[in-house]
Image (spheres, rainbow, N blue to C red):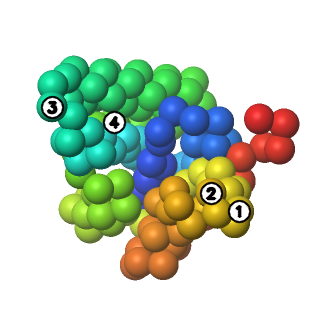
């Protein structure tokens, strides 16, 4: 049923919870796991100086976050591929799904409510509303 499962990560505890589920599903279905980290440099483009340093740091963070996914997948005997890309997060996730024939997305959610959710937006919500494949959302554990 699922051959390729995407788990977008931002290195947060919410992502970590989703990674566990994604690896378990990949194990059960014999699927390949895709770990994706999206660097949204547009948020830092207004900096007069230093935006390249910030983007470079985010790319390094992305490499580390996706490597952790690949290591955890390998420990479970699951094939994994990692990608760090640039762009708007939800659009980059949708594009990755289309370009790589992804069958399912497993994403963490921070569970923000009220004004925080309104002001910060929700990448997960936008993916759920616009994706053409099933999206499993995993809520961040309450103790984190």
For mark 2, what is the residue? Answer: 116
Marks 4 and 1 sit apart, C-alpha to C-alpha, by 31 Å
Q: Position of residue 95 (x, y in %)?
A: 25, 63
Give the secondary structure at mark 3.
Answer: loop
For mark 3, what is the residue? Answer: 48
Give the secondary structure at mark 1.
Answer: loop
Q: As drawn, is 71 to the left or to the right of 142?
A: left
Rendered position, 38 above or below 133: above
Tags 1 and 2 touching, CB below 8 Å = yes
Q: Position of residue 103 (x, y in %)?
A: 43, 66
Tags 4 and 2 touching, CB below 8 Å = no
Marks 2 and 3 sit apart, C-alpha to C-alpha, by 28 Å
Give the secondary structure at mark 4.
Answer: strand
Camera-nearest residue between 78 and 63: 63
Task: Tell me if mark 3 has few (under 14), some (14-19) or many (20+) residues whose alpha carbon lies within 10 angstroms of its own.
Answer: few
Tags 4 and 1 touching, CB below 8 Å = no
For mark 1, what is the residue? Answer: 113
Foreground tag (2 vs 3): 3
Rendered position, 30 above or below 69: below
Marks 4 and 2 sit apart, C-alpha to C-alpha, by 30 Å
Foreground tag (3 vs 4): 3
User: Which residue occupies 20% across, 29% down?
Assistant: 51
For mark 4, what is the residue? Answer: 82
């Amino acid at each position: 049923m699922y051959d390729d499962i995407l788990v977008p990560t931002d290195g947060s505890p919410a992502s970590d919870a989703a990674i566990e589920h994604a690896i378990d599903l990949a194990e059960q279905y014999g699927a390949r796991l895709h770990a994706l980290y999206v660097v949204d440099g547009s948020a830092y483009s207004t900096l007069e100086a230093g935006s390249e340093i910030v983007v470079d740091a985010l790319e390094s963070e992305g490499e580390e976050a996706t490597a952790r996914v690949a290591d955890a997948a390998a420990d479970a005997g699951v094939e994994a591929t990692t990608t760090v890309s640039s762009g708007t997060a939800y659009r980059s996730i949708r594009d990755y799904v289309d370009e790589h024939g992804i069958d399912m997305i497993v994403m963490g959610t921070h569970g923000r409510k009220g004004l925080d959710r309104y002001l910060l937006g929700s990448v997960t919500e936008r993916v759920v509303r616009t994706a053409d494949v099933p999206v499993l959302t995993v809520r961040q554990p309450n103790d984190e």
